[in-house]
């Protein structure tokens, strides 16, 4: 945007309680600003002391979202990439662990010249330097930075102080603050309560941050009286108090809701951006396809973390994108693999039109996943295996087609007679867990005449990885002779990236994570073709 003379910065904070959806709100704002013709980049500041979420359990933190450069990041970066055209790097996710690691490294090497190392200015300077570094790396108009955690958390204070300082340095109309808060409804009193929000804003103002816009998460509409009250006590115009109610059908309604509340218009006014209104027609069509589908399919996702709603976030969203593309409603059954071990496949999978086995680590539930793969293979049900899901397909094939009943991955049975999935040679001497897997984007050569080729329509693709174990090439000849198709290989042909079954309607496993590249109006081709196959299967079984 030629009119923009200075980079603009938006900081999104949250108050009262966690899990309000700051990441989704920031991503939705990014969508609206992009549709106004602005180039937007988003980043996340997380106050936890882990260097990154790579070593965290999905029960703790939801999925780990992997970027092209191999960074293991917060799942909110998935929202950022799905909702905008941003291609993010490890610079877009900063944790307290990274900040303190850098500060202590500088102290040990003498860079502070004998000074006492303190939170202010050394930690806050390091935080600001990450923002300046991102601004220097990116060609964009606006950087939206989400501050993780909740206002008042002790671990988040250095980040809040850093962005307060930064906003002063860049000037009034080049930086702004948006605060997301909860306005709870007390059923006994029959009214919305504003006091928690007032206290949250007061906490911010104590450290010198005055939000420009207040976004209120609420289950009931905000009356004009409530808006006026919040305006008075939070020191902002009534028009800058925005309602964000729970959406009725899909998270992709959020940008449209915020546009209706004029969020993007207020932002442009505050930052003095003269740009046209956002044309959201294509986005609206996508949302309408989700809400009013012409048909419906039932898919089963068989995993081990299904009780945590964010553990397979990108997989669920990718299936939603693909279903909408085909104007198809999606009923997704998230099935704990251990229940299949207990109750059997027919009861749990007998009425589904497709089966997905996502990634994961550890041996819990593995036998249930293998049973699901066997059911899909023998019943002609479309099957899509992601990362571990591909390895599961290979193990099942080895056991039940080749008759190697003890076949396994060395991750689950180090002494197996048939280690059809084994540890990469370069992984065998690694003892540290964080950031040591095969990570990030790698090239894959697609074999002609395969399901993968039909989906991609290209002989070379780039996909993101996160794993330690690989297809064991010692068994490649036996498996291909028995009907396993190796439809994707690394450029040197040493690593198997995709497998398929000959004679099956649609059965494919990939060692990578295609869910990290799917977008609402541009579904990933493998997900698109899997959903198409499920629709065809549903027609056959109707």
Image (cartoon, rainbow, N blue to C red):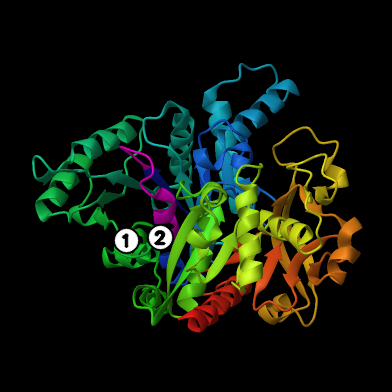
Is 25 one of the magenta-colored residues? yes
Mark number displayed over residue 263: 1
Asked if marks 1 and 2 touch (Cβ < 8 Å), the reply is yes
From mark 1 to mark 2, how far is it between C-alphas? 8 Å
- Counting from the top left corner in percent of width and height, residue 474 is at 91, 56
Residue displayed at 39% across by 79% down: 285
Q: Earlier in the sequence, mark 1 or mark 2?
A: 2
Residue displayed at 52% across by 73% down: 322
Q: Is residue 532 above or below residue 515?
A: below
**Helix, strand or loop status at disc 1:** helix
**Helix, strand or loop status at disc 2:** helix
Q: Is residue 138 above or below residue 170?
A: below
Residue displayed at 75% across by 66% down: 498
- Counting from the top left corner in percent of width and height, residue 79 is at 49, 57
- On screen, residue 218 versus residue 438, left or right, reads left
Q: Is residue 120 above or below residue 234?
A: above
- On screen, residue 428 versus residue 165, left or right, reads right
> Which range of residues does the magenta coloring cover?
14-29
Is 432 one of the magenta-colored residues? no
Q: Which residue is mark 2?
A: 29
- Counting from the top left corner in percent of width and height, residue 230 is at 18, 45
């Amino acid at each position: 945007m030629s009119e923009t003379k200075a980079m603009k910065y938006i900081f999104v904070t949250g108050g009262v309680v966690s899990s309000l959806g700051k990441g989704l709100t920031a991503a939705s704002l990014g969508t609206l600003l992009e549709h106004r013709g602005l180039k937007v980049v988003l980043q996340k500041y997380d106050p936890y002391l882990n260097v990154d979420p790579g070593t965290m359990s999905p029960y703790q933190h939801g999925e780990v979202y992997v970027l092209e450069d191999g960074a293991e990041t917060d799942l909110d970066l998935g929202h950022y990439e799905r909702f905008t055209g941003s291609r993010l790097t490890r610079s877009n996710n900063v944790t307290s662990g990274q900040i303190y690691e850098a500060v202590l490294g500088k102290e040990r090497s003498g860079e502070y010249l004998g000074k006492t190392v303190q939170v202010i200015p050394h930690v806050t300077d390091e935080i600001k330097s990450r923002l300046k570094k991102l601004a220097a790396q990116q060609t964009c108009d606006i950087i939206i930075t989400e501050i993780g955690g909740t206002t008042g958390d002790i671990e988040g204070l250095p980040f809040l102080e850093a962005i307060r300082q930064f906003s002063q340095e860049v000037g009034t109309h080049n930086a702004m603050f948006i605060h997301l808060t909860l306005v709870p409804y007390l059923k006994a009193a029959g009214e919305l309560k504003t006091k928690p929000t007032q206290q949250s804003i007061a906490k911010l103002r104590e450290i010198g941050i005055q939000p420009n816009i207040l976004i209120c998460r609420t289950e009931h509409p905000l009356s004009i009286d409530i808006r006026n009250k919040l305006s008075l006590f939070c020191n902002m115009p009534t028009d800058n108090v925005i309602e964000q109610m729970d959406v009725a059908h899909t998270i992709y309604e959020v940008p449209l809701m915020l546009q209706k509340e004029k969020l993007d218009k207020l932002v442009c006014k505050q930052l003095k951006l003269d740009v046209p209104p956002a044309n959201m027609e294509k986005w609206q069509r996508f949302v309408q396809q989700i809400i009013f589908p012409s048909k419906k399919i039932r898919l089963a996702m068989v995993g081990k973390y299904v009780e945590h709603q964010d553990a397979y976030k990108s997989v669920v969203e990718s299936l939603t994108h693909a279903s909408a593309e085909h104007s198809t409603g999606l009923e997704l059954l998230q099935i704990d693999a251990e229940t299949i071990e207990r109750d059997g496949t027919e009861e749990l999978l007998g009425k589904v039109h497709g089966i997905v086995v996502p990634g994961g680590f550890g041996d819990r539930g593995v036998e249930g996943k293998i049973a699901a793969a066997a059911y899909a293979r023998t019943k002609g049900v479309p099957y899509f295996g992601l990362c571990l899901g591909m390895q599961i397909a290979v193990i099942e094939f080895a056991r039940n087609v080749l008759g190697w009943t003890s076949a396994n991955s060395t991750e689950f049975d180090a002494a197996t007679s048939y280690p059809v999935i084994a540890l990469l040679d370069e992984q065998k001497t690694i003892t540290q867990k964080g950031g040591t897997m095969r990570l990030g984007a790698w090239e894959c050569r697609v074999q002609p005449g395969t399901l993968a080729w039909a989906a991609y329509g290209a002989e070379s693709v780039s996909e993101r990885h996160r794993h330690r174990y690989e297809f064991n090439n010692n068994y490649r000849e036996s498996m291909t002779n028995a009907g396993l198709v190796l439809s994707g290989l690394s450029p040197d042909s040493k690593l198997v990236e995709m497998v398929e079954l000959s004679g099956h309607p649609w059965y494919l496993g990939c060692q990578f994570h295609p869910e990290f590249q799917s977008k609402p109006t541009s579904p990933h081709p493998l997900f698109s073709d899997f959903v198409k196959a499920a629709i065809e299967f549903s027609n056959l079984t109707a």
